[in-house]
Image (tube, rainbow, N blue to C red):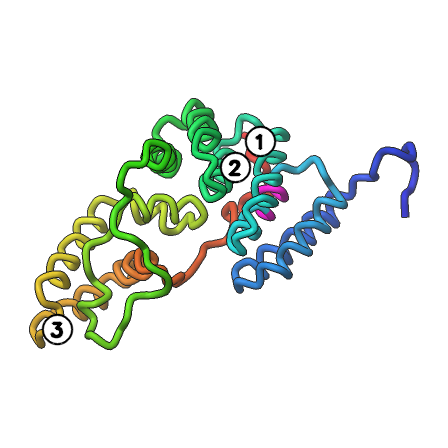
C-alpha cells in the first residue's frame, strides 16, 4: 500500500484519515468509545500529523477512564499543535485524574497563556490547585446517579460548580452551559426549590415547569449527579477538520 516515499516515512492519506475520523465522531456520539478509538487510530495511521485525531482519541480514552493512554494522546496533541488550547484541556484532564496535580496545574497554566478567558481551563487549574493543597472539593460525588425515588427534588439539589467545571473539560456542551449566566441563575433557583423540600406537589410542579421551559437545566443537574445525559462530539466534530488553521 505504500506508494512512493522512503521506508521509514508513512504515506499520508488525508482523505482516508478524514473518512475514518468522521466514523469515529459518529461512534463517539453514540458513546461507542471502543469503536471510536479504532476509527481514530485508523485516522492516525493515515495521517499521524493531525493533532485533532489525537485529541479525539484522548477524549474517548478519558471517557473509558483509561487516563494513562488519554495522557499520551493529549501530550502528542500538544506537541503537534502547541498553540491549540483544547490540547491542554485533554492533557490536563488526564493528569488530574491520575492525581498528578502539579503536572495538571502546569498544563492548565500553559493553556491559559493561549486562552486567558477560557472558563474550562481556568476551572481546571483551580480544581488542580485545590486538589494539590488538599482543599475540600465540595460534596463527595458518591458513585452513581442521584436516586429518583424521592421525587424530583432528590435530583435538583445544590450543584458543585467546581465538579461541573471538571466534567465540562470533556463535555463541550456542558462547558457552554456553564458560561451562560442566565442559565446558571435558573439552575441556582431550581436548586433552591429542590433543596427546600422538592417533594411537595407545588415544588414538583415548579420543577417540572422550569425543566420543560428550559431542558438544559435537567442536563446540568444530571451531569452534577453523575448521569451523563449527552456527551457532545469531541472537538466540535464537524468543524474540527480545519485543524485550527485560521
Determine the CA span between mark 2 and mark 3: 42 Å
Does the image show residue 246?
A: yes
Dot 2 or dot 3: first in sequence order is 2
Residue 184 versus residue 193: which sits nearer the camera? 193
Residue 182 image position (x, y, % from top left): 20, 47
Marks 3, 1: nearer the viewer: 3
Residue 40 image position (x, y, % from top left): 66, 50
Determine the CA span between mark 3 and mark 1: 48 Å
Position of residue 236 in the picture relative to residue 119 (left or right): right
Dot 3 or dot 1: first in sequence order is 1
CB-based contact (under 8 Å), mark 3 and mark 1: no
Dot 1 or dot 2: first in sequence order is 1
Note whether 43 is above or below 195 in the view shown: above
Q: Quadrant of residue 153?
A: bottom left
Q: Residues within 10 Å of mark 2 (few under 14, many from 20)?
A: many
Residue occupied by mark 2: 91
Residue 190 versus residue 138: which sits nearer the camera? 138
Give the magenta part as a residue range.
52-57
Please say whether residue 200 is one of the residues in the magenta stretch.
Answer: no
Residue drawn at point x = 73 percent, y = 43 percent? 14
Residue occupied by mark 3: 199
Residue 121 versus residue 137: which sits nearer the camera? 137
Residue 226 image position (x, y, % from top left): 36, 60
Residue drawn at point x = 73 percent, y = 41 percent? 47
CB-based contact (under 8 Å), mark 1 and mark 2: yes
Does the image show residue 237?
A: no
Residue 17 image position (x, y, % from top left): 71, 47
Residue occupied by mark 1: 78
Please say whether residue 56 is one of the residues in the magenta stretch.
Answer: yes
Determine the CA span between mark 1 and mark 2: 8 Å
Give SS at disc 2: helix
Residue 135 versus residue 161: which sits nearer the camera? 135
Amino acid at each position: 500500500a505504500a506508494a512512493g516515499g522512503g521506508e521509514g516515512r508513512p504515506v499520508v492519506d488525508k482523505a482516508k484519515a478524514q473518512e475514518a475520523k468522521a466514523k469515529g465522531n459518529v461512534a463517539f456520539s453514540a458513546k461507542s468509545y471502543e469503536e471510536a478509538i479504532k476509527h481514530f487510530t485508523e485516522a492516525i495511521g493515515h495521517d499521524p500529523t493531525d493533532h485533532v485525531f489525537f485529541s479525539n482519541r484522548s477524549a474517548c480514552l478519558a471517557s473509558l477512564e483509561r487516563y494513562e493512554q488519554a495522557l499520551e494522546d493529549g501530550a502528542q496533541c500538544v506537541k503537534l499543535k502547541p498553540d491549540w488550547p483544547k490540547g491542554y484541556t485533554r492533557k490536563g484532564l488526564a493528569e488530574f485524574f491520575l492525581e498528578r496535580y502539579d503536572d495538571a496545574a502546569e498544563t492548565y497554566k500553559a493553556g491559559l497563556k493561549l486562552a486567558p478567558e477560557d472558563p474550562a481551563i481556568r476551572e481546571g487549574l483551580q480544581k488542580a490547585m485545590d486538589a494539590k493543597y488538599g482543599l475540600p472539593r465540595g460534596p463527595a460525588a458518591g458513585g452513581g446517579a442521584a436516586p429518583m425515588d424521592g421525587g424530583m427534588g432528590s435530583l435538583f439539589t445544590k450543584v458543585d460548580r467546581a465538579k461541573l467545571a471538571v466534567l465540562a473539560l470533556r463535555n463541550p456542551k456542558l462547558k457552554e452551559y456553564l458560561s451562560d449566566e442566565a442559565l446558571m441563575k435558573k439552575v441556582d433557583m431550581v436548586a433552591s426549590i429542590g433543596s427546600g423540600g422538592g417533594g411537595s406537589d407545588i415544588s414538583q410542579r415548579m420543577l417540572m415547569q422550569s425543566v420543560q421551559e428550559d431542558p438544559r437545566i435537567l442536563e446540568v443537574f444530571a451531569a452534577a449527579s453523575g448521569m451523563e445525559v449527552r456527551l457532545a462530539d469531541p472537538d466540535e466534530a464537524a468543524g474540527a477538520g480545519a485543524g485550527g488553521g485560521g
